[in-house]
Amino acid sequence: MVLSADTKCLTEANTFAMSPIMFHSILPFLIIAPPLVYALISLWCGRAHFSRKRPQNATLPPVTILKPVKGMDAESFANFASFCCQDYPCFQMVFAVASAEDPAIPVINRLMAEFPAVDMELVVDGRLYGPNYKVCNLINAFPMAKYDIIIVCDSDIRVGERYLQEVCAPFSDPEVGLVTSLYRTTGVYGAASAIEAMGFTTEMVPNVMVALKLEGLSFALGASMAVRRAALEKIGGFTALVDYLADDYQLGNKVWRAGYRLELSDYYVESIMHRETLKNILSRQLRWARTMRVSRPGGYFASGITQPFPAACLSLVVSGFSLPGLAAAILLYACRAVTALVYSRSFVRDNIFPRWLWLLPVRDFFAFATWALSFLGNRVSWRGHLFRLLPGGRIEEEGPFPSP
C-alpha cells in the first residue's frame, strides 16, 4: 500500500503530537527516580552489611567510659546503671559535670552507692576551653582515664550487658583507631517522639549503610564512640574538637585522616526518649541538619534529590494531579514503606513499624522542611545556649564567652 504525501505528513504530525503527551506521562516517574533508586540502594547496602559474616570477639582490653553530663535526661539512673552491669572483666567509668549544682550529681552518687564494685569517678570541673561545653567536660575528665581504650557515650544512652564486648572486639586489629555504634529507639511516647525515632530508622541508619558501602566510614556517631588513646593523642586530644558543634563527626574524621581505620559496630545502643513537644523535637532536628550542612556541605546539599516528600509532591503537580502523577507518588511511597518496614523489622529491630507507618509522609515532610531551613540560617540552640555556625563546622557562642 502506497501512502500519499498528505497522509505521510499527517502521520508524522500525529507522531510528533504524541511525544509531549508521552513525555508528560513519563515525567512524574523521572522525578521520583532519584529517591526511588536511593531507597533500593539503601536496601541493598543494608542487606549486604547485616548479612555479612561477623568477626569473633578476640580481645577484651581494659576500657575507660567517659560520661559528660549536664542536667537530667529521661530515666538517667537506669541509663547510667546499664553501663555498670557489663559482662566485661575490667572497665572504669568517669562522670564529668561542670557545676556542683548539677541535678545529675545525686543520681551519680546513688549509682556509686549501689554499684560499689564498679570503678567510678566523678569529676566536677567548670573550666572552659572553647564553646563546646560537652567537650570541655571531656577535657576535664580525661586525666582520670586509666586505660588505653576510651569510650565516649551520651548521657541519654542505655546499653545491654554485652555492649563492651561487642564494641571493643575490633580493637584486636591495631589499624583500628575508632569504633562507633548505630543507635535506635524502641520506646516512643506519642506521635511527636515517634517522628524523631523514625528518623533513625528511615534516614540515619540507611544513610550510614549507603556511605559505608560506597565510600567507607570516615565519621563517627556521637551516641557511642570508642577510640584508641594513641589515635586520640595523634589528633591533638579532645582539645582538637572543642571549637566544633559536631564533635562526633570531627573525632571520627580526624582519626580517619590520621591514618586509622574506623569500624561500625553491629551493636545498637538505645537512645532513651521522653515525652516532648513537637516544637522541641523539630528544633533539635534543625540543629542536627545545620550541623550536617556545615560538616559535609557537598554531600548534604546533594542529599536533597533523595528526599521523597518533595519528589512525590512535584510528580503530582507537574502531571496536573493526573493518573500518571498519582501512580508515581503511590509507587514511590510503596517502595518507601517497604524500605521502612525492612529496616525496622529486620535491620534495626525497633518495632516502630508498622504501627507508625501512617506517619511516614509526615516524617518525610519535616525532614524536607529541616533540610531546606538549614540553608536559611547559621544559628543553633543547644542545651540552653545559642551558637553561630561558622564555615567548616566551627561554632562561636552568641554573647560573652568566659575564659578558662
Image: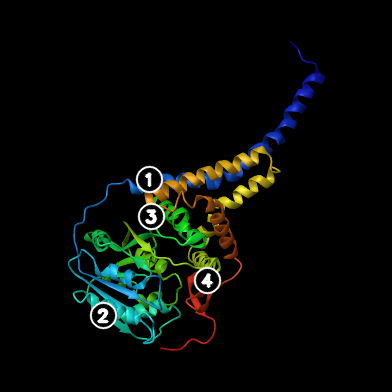
Report helix, strand or loop for mark 2: strand
Q: Which residue has dot 1 on it?
A: 47
Mark 2 neighbour class, 10 Å CA radius: few under 14, some 14 to 19, many 20 or more: some
Mark 3 neighbour class, 10 Å CA radius: few under 14, some 14 to 19, many 20 or more: some
Q: Which residue has dot 2 on it?
A: 121
**What's under tag 4, amino acid-wise?**
Pro
Q: CA distance from mark 2 to mark 1?
A: 41 Å
- The picture places residue 224, in percent across and down from the top left corner, at 34, 65
Q: Is residue 146 visible?
A: no
Report helix, strand or loop for mark 4: helix
- The picture places residue 77, in percent across and down from the top left corner, at 33, 73
Q: CA distance from mark 4 to mark 2?
A: 37 Å
Q: Residue placed at 41% from the left, 66% from the top?
A: 249
Check whether the beta carbons of the residues at disc 1 and disc 3 lie within 8 A of each other.
no
Q: CA distance from mark 2 to mark 3?
A: 36 Å
Q: Earlier in the sequence, mark 2 or mark 3?
A: 2
Q: Which residue has dot 4 on it?
A: 391
**What's under tag 2, amino acid-wise?**
Glu
154 left or right, relative to 25: left
Q: Is residue 225 above or below residue 136?
A: above
Q: Earlier in the sequence, mark 3 or mark 4?
A: 3
Q: Is residue 120 above or below residue 364?
A: below
Q: Quadrant of the C terminus?
A: bottom left
Report helix, strand or loop for mark 1: helix
9 left or right, relative to 145: right
Q: Is residue 107 visible?
A: yes
Report helix, strand or loop for mark 3: loop
178 left or right, relative to 306: left
Q: Which residue has dot 3 on it?
A: 216
Q: Relative to the observer, which residue lies in front, 362 or 190?
A: 190
